[in-house]
Amino acid sequence: MKFKYQRNSVIAIMLAASGIVSAEDKLNEWTGNVELGFVNTTGNTETQIINAKAKAQLDQEKWRHTAIYESLNSSNNDSTTAERYVLNGQSDYKFSEFNYFFIMVNYENDRFGGYDYRISETLGYGRRVLHRETLTLDLEVGPGARQSKLSDNGSENEVTVRGAAKVAWKITGYSRLTEDLSADVGEDATVIKSVTALTAQINGSLATKVTYTIKNTSEVPDGVKKTDTETAVTLVYSF
């Protein structure tokens, strides 16, 4: 428990540091948002839980840096029924208007997913194949690696290939639909994840978001289901 609190404190300091940088360097503009809401899950955890997310992004002339933190927690009669933490960082080097190289690192800790943690690294190429005023589509592909620590103290290390598609559709001036689809194909398992989100603006800084997430893992430890789904309704504060 002490380790969990220390880890959350480190993440909070990292996000706070982003604001300090933006104040000191006016040439760079940090943007981001914080989400808090209610989630109903099926699969390995079937319960009602609280979902929290934070995202910060710095977009420069040649570089774009993005950091995302997610937590999902629930308890019932003093017993933890769901606990997951995700930390993702990606840096893109834009060598032309619609082309970029990227490096991404993802950390996931899920007590009820059969793994103590999973870390994956990917180095690849991305391109914006559709660029319109109200609709964009980015495609990414690249090789990587994944290290997994199983709940039974076993471990897995494998080479992976990642493919991803990111769609953003501005439906109206106050609503937006996004779809993030990714597939990480490894020697031991393939992980496919789809995140569909509809955001409706309330005012300049506040919005509501409905998110539906499906995650399928082809090979899982005994007693663990291959597919998890999440339906979330959150309040979003942008800065």
Image (spheres, rainbow, N blue to C red):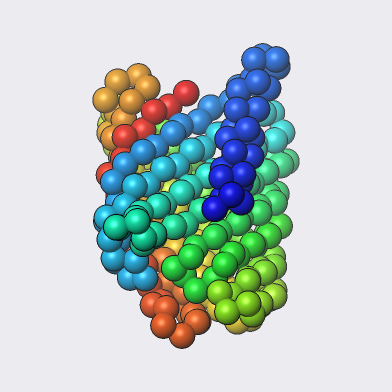
Residue 129 in picture, x, y percent from top left: 53, 49
**In the image, 53: left or right of 86?**
left
Q: Quadrant of residue 83?
A: bottom left
Up-down relation of residue 64 to residue 20 (above or below): below
Residue at point 58%, 79% (across, down) = 152
Residue at point 64%, 39% (across, down) = 10
Residue 180 in picture, x, y percent from top left: 44, 53
Residue at point 39%, 59% (across, down) = 80
Q: Quadrant of residue 6?
A: top right
**In the image, 115: left or right of 203?**
right
Residue at point 64%, 35% (across, down) = 14
Q: Residue furthest front?
A: 78
Q: 79 and 61: which one is in front?
A: 79
Residue 172 in picture, x, y percent from top left: 28, 31
Residue 36 in picture, x, y percent from top left: 36, 38
Up-down relation of residue 142 to residue 159 (above or below): above
